Image (cartoon, rainbow, N blue to C red):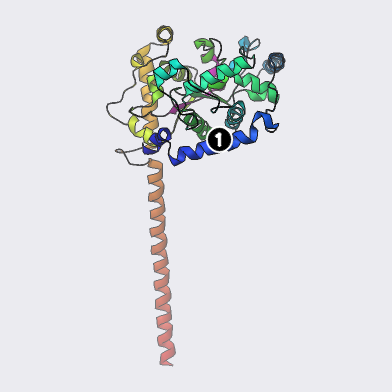
């Protein structure tokens, strides 16, 4: 747990992350003319043209009977399918002025406390608010960042996400990037900060569930905030809905932890996932989702399936009491030790044969 807390306390690891990000920011700063985005940012007209071209591609893909895009609901609006690579996210954040140009509002300070900019303590809520302000400043408030980047880089269908990341926005933004790196440096990932239209009410549960079915691969990002015992995403009703939707859509579901100690908490005998105790920033969202989940399978079914998933993940990566490493590592050590002992015993036998041979040879020579 120490390394995780260090991220919040400005440790050497956190300082190295910030230093690398600031170096990238200086290299890609908008006024330098360098970097993949450059200036100016795409206009709303450019983004709309890019969206139209991409939708034409998805129609052609559906006409070719592509399995993923067989549903025509994406013909008119496919923005929920667009993902972003880890390096693209880092390039965008370095170019748009984050986090040096961000300050918390008085309301946010009263709720979350003051913020020392540039120390890596900004949360996902801070990043989402900054993205909203950025889009408004660029007159792009009707789009998501992923759509803007797609227009800037002309990626077309190549921008569609392959992996859906479910995580908690209360975690630091650096932790989200760490989770993205652990998932893949090359694959396009669906991350809410960049893939939702932040200035609009864009999280439509049925559409999100359908998009998860298209991706077919969901990762649950597990990270523990200071002072808490369980991963933050397991206290958020939206995250519970996303994982349960993945199970219903028969998508592959894997867990990715920000740090190995996160797994120990999942093996705690007192831990049991309960969606009814989960929270949402807007209480009305929780009521809406609970009603929706009751129609799908019921809260008890959600709790049972998610608890089984998390317990299976923890058992797969840890065995025994806290502090005992993954069974795969222990098994590999046993194999290596057995191989070393076998080689040593075999080598000792060969040396004994050679020694007895030369002793006999020496006796024969001495007798002559």
Seen in the picture, residue 329 relative to 272 is either above or below; the reply is: below
Percent of width and height locating residue 243: 45, 20
> Does residue 205 appear to the left or right of 67 in the view shown?
left
Percent of width and height locating residue 352: 39, 72
Name the residue at 50% across, 34% down.
182
> Does residue 318 appear to the left or right of 163 in the view shown?
left
Q: How many marks do you count on the picture?
A: 1
Q: In terms of secondary structure, where does tag 1 sit?
A: helix
Seen in the picture, residue 128 relative to 322 is either above or below; the reply is: above
Residue 155 in view (yes/no):
no
Q: Which segment did they paint magenta?
A: 209-224
Residue 69, by quadrant, is top right
Residue 307 in view (yes/no):
yes
Residue at the limit of the structure toward the left, as seen here = 270
Quarter of the image with the C terminus is: bottom left
- The residue carrying mark 1 is 21
| Nearer the observer, 13 or 232 | 13
Percent of width and height locating residue 72: 63, 10
> Does residue 162 appear to the left or right of 12 in the view shown?
right
| Nearer the observer, 335 or 234 | 234
| Residue 60 in magenta stretch | no
């Amino acid at each position: 747990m120490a390394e995780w807390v260090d991220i919040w306390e400005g440790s050497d690891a956190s300082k190295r992350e910030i230093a690398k990000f600031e170096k990238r920011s200086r290299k890609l700063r908008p006024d330098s003319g360098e970097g993949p985005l450059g200036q100016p940012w795409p206009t709303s007209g450019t983004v709309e043209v890019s969206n139209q071209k991409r939708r034409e591609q998805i129609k052609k893909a559906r006409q070719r009977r592509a399995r993923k895009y067989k549903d025509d609901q994406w013909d008119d609006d496919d923005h929920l399918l667009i993902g972003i690579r880890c390096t693209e996210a880092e390039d965008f954040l370095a170019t748009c002025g984050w986090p040096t140009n961000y300050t918390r509002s008085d309301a946010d300070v009263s709720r979350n406390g003051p913020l020392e900019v540039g120390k890596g303590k900004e949360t996902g809520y801070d990043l989402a608010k900054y993205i909203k302000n950025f889009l408004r400043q660029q007159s792009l408030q009707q789009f998501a960042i992923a759509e803007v980047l797609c227009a800037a880089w002309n990626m077309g269908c190549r921008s569609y996400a392959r992996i859906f990341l479910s995580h908690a926005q209360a975690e630091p933004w650096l932790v989200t990037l760490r989770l993205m790196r652990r998932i893949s440096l090359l694959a396009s990932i669906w991350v809410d900060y960049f893939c939702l239209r932040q200035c609009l009410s864009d999280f439509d549960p049925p559409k999100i569930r359908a998009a998860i079915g298209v991706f077919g691969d969901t990762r649950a990002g597990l990270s523990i905030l200071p002072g808490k015992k369980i991963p933050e995403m397991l206290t958020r009703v939206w995250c519970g809905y996303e994982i349960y939707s993945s199970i219903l859509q028969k998508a592959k579901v894997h867990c990715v932890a920000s740090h190995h100690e996160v797994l120990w908490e999942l093996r705690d005998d007192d831990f049991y996932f309960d969606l009814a105790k989960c929270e949402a920033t807007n209480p009305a969202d929780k009521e809406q989702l609970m009603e929706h989940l009751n129609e799908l399978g019921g809260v008890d079914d959600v709790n049972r399936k998610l608890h089984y998933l998390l317990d299976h993940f923890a058992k797969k990566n840890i065995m025994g009491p806290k502090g005992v490493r993954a069974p795969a590592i222990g098994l590999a050590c046993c194999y290596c030790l057995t191989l070393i002992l076998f080689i040593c015993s075999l080598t000792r036998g060969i040396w004994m044969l050679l020694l007895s041979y030369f002793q006999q040879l020496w006796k024969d020579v001495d007798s002559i």
